[in-house]
Image (cartoon, coloured by chain):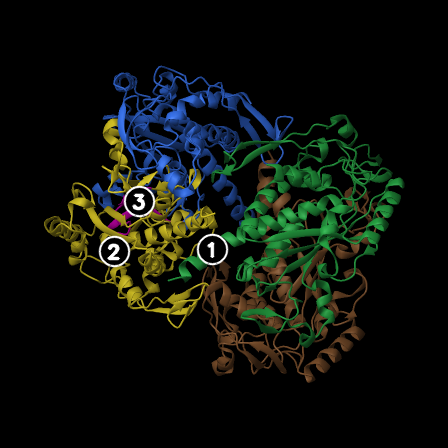
Chain colours: A yellow, B blue, C brown, D green
Amino acid sequence: MDFIRQELNRRRPGQSTLTTSRRESDEVQFLSGIYEGKTTGAPIGFIVRNEDHRPGDYEDIKDVFRPSHADFTYQMKYGVRDPRGGGSSSARETVTRCIAGAIAKLALHQKGVKIQAYTSQIGDIRLEGTYKAYDLSQTEANVVRCPDVEKAAAMEALINAVKVGGDSIGGVISCVIQGMPAGVGEPKFGKLHALLGTAMLSIPAAKGFDYGDGFDAPLYKGSEHNDEFFNDNGVINTRSNYSGGIQGGISNGQDIYFRVAFKATATLSREQQTVDRYGNETILKAKGRHDPCVVPRAVPVVEAMAAITILDQLLFQIHYHEFGKN
Amino acid sequence: MDFIRQELNRRRPGQSTLTTSRRESDEVQFLSGIYEGKTTGAPIGFIVRNEDHRPGDYEDIKDVFRPSHADFTYQMKYGVRDPRGGGSSSARETVTRCIAGAIAKLALHQKGVKIQAYTSQIGDIRLEGTYKAYDLSQTEANVVRCPDVEKAAAMEALINAVKVGGDSIGGVISCVIQGMPAGVGEPKFGKLHALLGTAMLSIPAAKGFDYGDGFDAPLYKGSEHNDEFFNDNGVINTRSNYSGGIQGGISNGQDIYFRVAFKATATLSREQQTVDRYGNETILKAKGRHDPCVVPRAVPVVEAMAAITILDQLLFQIHYHEFGKN
Amino acid sequence: MDFIRQELNRRRPGQSTLTTSRRESDEVQFLSGIYEGKTTGAPIGFIVRNEDHRPGDYEDIKDVFRPSHADFTYQMKYGVRDPRGGGSSSARETVTRCIAGAIAKLALHQKGVKIQAYTSQIGDIRLEGTYKAYDLSQTEANVVRCPDVEKAAAMEALINAVKVGGDSIGGVISCVIQGMPAGVGEPKFGKLHALLGTAMLSIPAAKGFDYGDGFDAPLYKGSEHNDEFFNDNGVINTRSNYSGGIQGGISNGQDIYFRVAFKATATLSREQQTVDRYGNETILKAKGRHDPCVVPRAVPVVEAMAAITILDQLLFQIHYHEFGKN
Amino acid sequence: MDFIRQELNRRRPGQSTLTTSRRESDEVQFLSGIYEGKTTGAPIGFIVRNEDHRPGDYEDIKDVFRPSHADFTYQMKYGVRDPRGGGSSSARETVTRCIAGAIAKLALHQKGVKIQAYTSQIGDIRLEGTYKAYDLSQTEANVVRCPDVEKAAAMEALINAVKVGGDSIGGVISCVIQGMPAGVGEPKFGKLHALLGTAMLSIPAAKGFDYGDGFDAPLYKGSEHNDEFFNDNGVINTRSNYSGGIQGGISNGQDIYFRVAFKATATLSREQQTVDRYGNETILKAKGRHDPCVVPRAVPVVEAMAAITILDQLLFQIHYHEFGKN
């Protein structure tokens, strides 16, 4: 339970001046599935109640479509829409992902699998190289969750400047999964990287996903990019890892690493042109509280979604080992 | 049937000097699900037999792990492996995706939805801007399937040079979906872009996916990046489309556009260091026939996977409209 | 909301002397998915809290396996077990089914589909014939929910006698679905009767399911049993309905009717021989409160599961109609 | 492969005078998923071609709805219908179930699980008692697959009499699963008996399913029906097994036994009244070849569906054991 609380605190609003001023203690009340500190196999039910919601803040936007939010698309899909707090499109739902992720991490810990994410880009300030160039133990030492101290300071300054202008900014989160056994993932339509991709792209504001050398892969020839196998004192390892730990959709035992791109928060403190649901053009000025940059708070969400995905696949893979013995 | 054959020809090997020299006519034999030219609702079964397979080509690699292929990971996952033609990890399976995609396109055509993909990068040669800057009707006019004639010629030259060196190269495919109705896609874990992402990442050699301004999104502030709504003669449209036609995971009626990154083909005509399944280090020289660049042939595969994904979601969405009437 | 409450009251404990003496008001608190009295398309979250639970009642059975309960099997499956109230195997979970069923019924009502279940057997007292022989509007007029007044009285007497003996008894529930459109259900592995069957067999204490003339079907020859079609003033109807409204797994527009068998409640007020988790033989005397017969309270549960199943399939079927128009 | 062929022969038409006169050798051609006699983990693709089909036999029924067949319901569902051989509603699809079942049986054999089905009723001739009263090794010794020699002879005579009259008859198949480990199955919506039920109800002509004492359960009081646990030389066993080896949806290690009711074949050799798709009343006289009773040939189908279901759940259960070790 302490571990779950600690993970939630990493996502919680109000951690620093960089994040929304909503004050939520994010207290979890477990309803089912845990008995005497152990999961029982029953569904794990829990509630995290909103404490600092101010429905009045949303009265003005009841009939207005906020640009680049889901207001218009929900209206088109369902014909009705719950405007309170952005309704079910609110990123507040990521609190539940962190709880599930914390539980998944505890199970993965038993298997020696470790997942770490960090901010690798805010605006145009970006870290060069992969996770290997950084000491990830420094990630939580600053409010932007960037393991490079100098870049972290620059990122913080950029977010603050953007906030002063009533504006917002996006970034990139990188993540590495270490201690991964080989043989996990399914071929064709359950490829491990595709499952990680769909998990990451489900996070609000995510715009892209790549793994290994990803969008840089086209720059390399096959002879440069292929990961040669060698006998590493009895273990088959690869000399390089452009593949990002996954070949043919299945883990090869090397580190899995990937990136997720996030756009700037759609909610702004400045005026914007838009229309209401009747088609009338209008001016929107957001009164809700919001993050000028969601990236630092999304770091534990990326880890959580990775943990859930990896644990699922690890459980599936157990089948083969069991029957493979015969 | 003619349309299905035409789509298969776009993916077929042996189209040009850029592709593998395997000769496959890719004749489809339908077994079920079609009666008098119409689908009956029963599963559509079909076979496309290999004609030019040479199992002898694979004898040498029976126990050897080809670098950056799925040989090692399949061995680790299943404990057994079928080496013939790369077994079930062979990209030859994409022929079935093109058949399903052709059928999906026929259904989408009824709804006015049009899907077009094109090669936007080979090696370091890339198209600037989005699909709006190009005349996509020119895509099929050259062997690399790039709508920019000059860039296409440079790409073709690069692939040929790489091929002469016994090497391979990757690239990027861009795709646009036009005529899309608003309201399609599911929130949270069935977001339309996440479903497209998992579909694209399931294609062999895919390394990354982004949509809208994707990995460039972090470079823009919210005020620059938000897509303002306006009343466009009675229709609610957006002035810009950085969102790529999807907001909160649901289509907003604007064009959907996305990119897929592909690595260089792992099979090379030159020697590579590797190990066999017993851990012995060895030299591999591929004798199988292969593509120096899969990107041109992957263009119809990207379209097919997009068509399948969009049709599925369009069918789901019909529910809401039906009940929404009441 | 009133309708949901009314449906819950039909399942609620403490309705009569026939049911458990637990007092639960079964107040539902909706957490999400409903706004201004309409569903929004978001998941409908709700809580029904236990009010009259007495954990002390379960202290004695913490390590004891109650005969014909799920204590032993849960222990074998999960290695841990939550003994409070029978843990997650408690039939108390059926309260959630009634809530979902009530919402499904509201949607089905829009489509003219009506679902009615009734008690057709308790012990060896059984109703002859199908639903056609009874006035189902009388079902809720007595505590056993049997539309035959005399049989209902006999059933009530039997349950009371069994209760006095510290014992329990089972029965059969019959159900009819009227106003069903033709064409609903999927062939092969999604047959409408198979989906209804799995739904019914998921109800605690269910032992069997049949539809149409079910286990009596073998007694009829094909020439007696086949349902002839005829032109009923422009509508294609069948003269008989041994098929129970489903042919080849798909509804044919006639009434769907089926039966569900229930065993006697496993919890008894008398002593029973058993073992504890360490294998020690022991005497169990239940102190928890329980129903001498679950059948009357299971009537709304059967209806709820039928409503959920039918609505799901009705939604799937809409696809075909939409595309079939072209 | 020999085992698969042997299983297919049990289902094959033309085995005796009791079955359809169609001559099908049911030769299986495997296309994928097997290499050097072992499954590779890839999907197992195969074809069994029709050899003795006579499309002309179906010309007359192209527009006619055969009573109690799926012709009318398919037409209503899909708007189109493939009349050849009954299209995709033909029971010929059960050949594929037997192949999958044979493979599942081979895997179950490794785990010591044995599945045996037998004919327990034809028309009004029925076996009393459960599988325990019979020597199941005699099942395959007669053409009706009934382990009671005298009853078998009577059943055979009944089927032949019915056949002479151009009519058909139904029956019941009973099945027992022995060697089942405890702890298999999922609570609530994946109960082992519900999964078996949906599998059985997916078989063409199935009308009902029950397990343990099933539809007889209501006749017993809880004190008679509960299965007492006792310490059987260190193993926890039950003295009786009315539960049919499943408690709370999860196997308890005792034998699982269940019944499936089948109706008479809908195809008859005598005239029947019906209508065509335009609503015209007409007389149907079937020319297709058919079984006067499907029950004997359905015995291996019941076993196959049980094997597939049990293997699936056994694989799922492995998860808990793996993590439970920690």
Q: Do dots 1 and 3 share one subunit?
A: no
The answer to whether the residues at label 1 and label 3 have Cβ atoms under 8 Å apart is: no
Label 2 sits on a secondary structure element that is helix
Q: Chain of mark 2?
A: A
Give the residue number, with chain letter if any, for mark 1.
D318
Q: Which residues are magenta?
A: A252-277
Q: Identify the residue at horizontal 79%, vertical 29% (top origin).
A: D60
SS at circle 1 = helix
Q: Is residue B152 visible?
A: yes
Q: Quadrant of residue A21?
A: bottom left
Name the residue furthest bottom: C164
Q: Going from the N terminus, do you reach mark 2 or mark 3 first?
A: 3
Q: Nearer the viewer, residue A190 or C241?
A: A190
The crowd level at tag 3 (other Cα within 10 Å; few <14, some 14-19, many 20+) is many
User: Mark 2 = which residue?
Assistant: A297
Mark 2: amino acid: Arg
Instruction: State how far apart marks 2 and 1 are (Cα).
Output: 36 Å
Chain for numbered disc 1 = D
Q: For the N terminus of chain C, which image quadrant?
A: bottom right
Q: Please tell me how many numbered marks the rendered image carries.
A: 3
Where does label 3 land, which residue? A253
Q: Which of the 4 image quadrants contains residue D97?
A: top right
Q: Amino acid at mark 1?
A: Ile
Front-most of A24 and C195? C195
Name above or below for residue C111 compared with residue B286. below
| Amino acid beneath label 3 | Gly
